[in-house]
Image (spheres, rainbow, N blue to C red):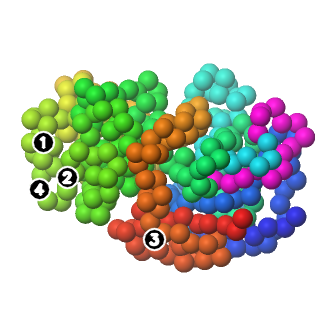
């Protein structure tokens, strides 16, 4: 069977080609893609500003935020996945058998590391069909849209960023989130659901307005005045018990050590790999800060789906998709994601049923 699939050959070289869909291995499923989000990391790889996309190894199919339907299963499936199931899947994929995986480390530590939508050996969802190993695929509720399924990977980053690796948050906490993009908004919903006082920082007025609809009690503009003073003013000099850095911005990263409360938990989930960021690291000593990062998530796919399903009546996930484009207009969709960042919160590709 042939299908139209996108391949990123290098910076600004994204092509749609008709290719043969690979035959299933016994433990794989064939998925008809229904929706696929364009992430900021996809844009950075397209523009040649990120080394995460491994087109140096060969052209690859982007798309790590996807939802679809299983149309065929391998002969040796051990899971309960069935033809007709609506599904989504993990992005960072550990093999489960190497020394690091057996040690229980994060999938980003896997010695046979794969990352769906970023490498030739793990093609993503920007194509009519995709083949994925059953261990990385998760069933979503039947009443969800495919776009809802595409949001699971994004939401899992904000969710795991706060709760993963021994993290926690509750109603006694003040939570400050740097960045109101898709990941930051996901973290905002997680923090607000816990009952924590939730403060979001973002320079874009549109995103601050959106954050107020998705759980933020207070929003701050870091360009209006000194952000440390703003934070201390609205927290009575306390700072953030939990500080989530979801922007990847150098200035924002440096600020987390200033706006964190004593004994605060700092969660770094915004991408900044490949450059040095000057920070006053000594404040981690005198404030007794706990700092954790999370590249990918571990065992949070199904938990994320359950969490989202519980709050879907509270938060309008559909409204988070600012633009929809059919896959046939892939290049137009990327153009919007690249050039209209102030308004393009999530550009979602759609596929024919």
Between marks 1 and 3, how big is the CA–CA gap?
34 Å
In the rendered image, which residue does mark 1 sit on?
234
- Indicate the quadrant where residue 260 lies: top left
Depth check: 171 or 225 in front? 171
Q: Are marks 2 and 4 in contact (CB under 8 Å)?
A: no
Between marks 2 and 3, how big is the CA–CA gap?
25 Å
In the rendered image, which residue does mark 4 sit on?
225
For marks 4 and 1 on the same chain, the one whose residue lies earlier in the sequence: 4
Residue 42, how many percent across, how many down?
Answer: 54, 61
Q: In this view, does 81 lie to the left or right of 281?
A: right
Question: Is the C terminus in the top left, top right, bottom left or bottom right quadrant?
Answer: bottom right
Between label 1 and label 3, give the one nearer the viewer.
1
Say if 328 sits above or below 142 in the image: below
For marks 2 and 3 on the same chain, the one whose residue lies earlier in the sequence: 2
Note whether residue 285 is visible.
Answer: no
Residue 169, how many percent across, how many down?
Answer: 34, 28
In the rendered image, which residue does mark 2 sit on?
220
For marks 1 and 3 on the same chain, the one whose residue lies earlier in the sequence: 1
**Which circle marks residue 338 in the picture?**
3
Would you call the spot at circle 1 few (<14 residues within 10 Å), some (14-19), or many (20 or more)? few
Between marks 4 and 3, how big is the CA–CA gap?
28 Å
From which residue to which does the magenta span run?
Answer: 61-81
Q: Residue at x 24, y 36 (%)?
A: 197
Between label 2 and label 4, give the one nearer the viewer.
2
């Amino acid at each position: 069977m042939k299908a139209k699939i996108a391949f990123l050959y290098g910076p600004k070289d994204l092509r749609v080609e008709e290719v043969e869909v690979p035959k299933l291995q016994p433990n794989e499923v064939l998925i008809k893609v229904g929706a696929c989000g364009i992430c900021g990391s996809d844009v950075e790889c397209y523009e040649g500003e990120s080394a995460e996309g491994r087109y140096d190894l060969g052209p690859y199919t982007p798309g790590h935020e996807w939802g679809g339907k299983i149309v065929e299963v391998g002969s040796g499936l051990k899971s309960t996945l069935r033809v007709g199931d609506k599904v989504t899947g993990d992005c960072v994929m550990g093999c489960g058998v190497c020394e690091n995986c057996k040690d229980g480390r994060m999938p980003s530590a896997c010695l046979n590391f794969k990352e769906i939508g970023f490498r030739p050996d793990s093609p993503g969802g920007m194509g009519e069909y995709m083949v994925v190993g059953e261990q990385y695929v998760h069933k979503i509720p039947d009443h969800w849209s495919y776009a809802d399924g595409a949001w699971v990977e994004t939401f899992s980053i904000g969710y795991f960023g706060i709760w993963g690796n021994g993290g926690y948050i509750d109603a006694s906490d003040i939570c400050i989130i740097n960045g109101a993009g898709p990941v930051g908004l996901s973290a905002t919903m997680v923090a607000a659901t816990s009952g924590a006082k939730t403060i979001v920082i973002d320079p874009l007025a549109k995103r601050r307005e959106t954050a107020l609809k998705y759980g933020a009690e207070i929003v701050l503009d870091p360009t209006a005045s000194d952000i440390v003073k703003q934070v201390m003013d609205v927290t009575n000099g306390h700072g953030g018990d939990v500080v989530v850095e979801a922007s990847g911005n150098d200035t924002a990263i440096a600020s987390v050590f200033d706006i964190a409360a004593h004994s605060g938990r700092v969660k770094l989930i915004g991408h900044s790999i490949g450059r040095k960021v000057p920070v006053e690291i000594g404040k981690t000593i005198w404030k007794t800060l706990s700092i954790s990062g999370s590249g990918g998530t571990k065992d949070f796919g199904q938990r994320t789906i359950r969490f989202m399903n519980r709050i879907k009546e509270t938060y309008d996930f559909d409204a988070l998709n600012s633009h929809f484009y059919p896959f046939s207009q892939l290049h137009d969709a990327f153009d919007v994601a690249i050039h209209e960042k102030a308004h393009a919160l999530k550009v979602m590709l759609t596929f024919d049923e």
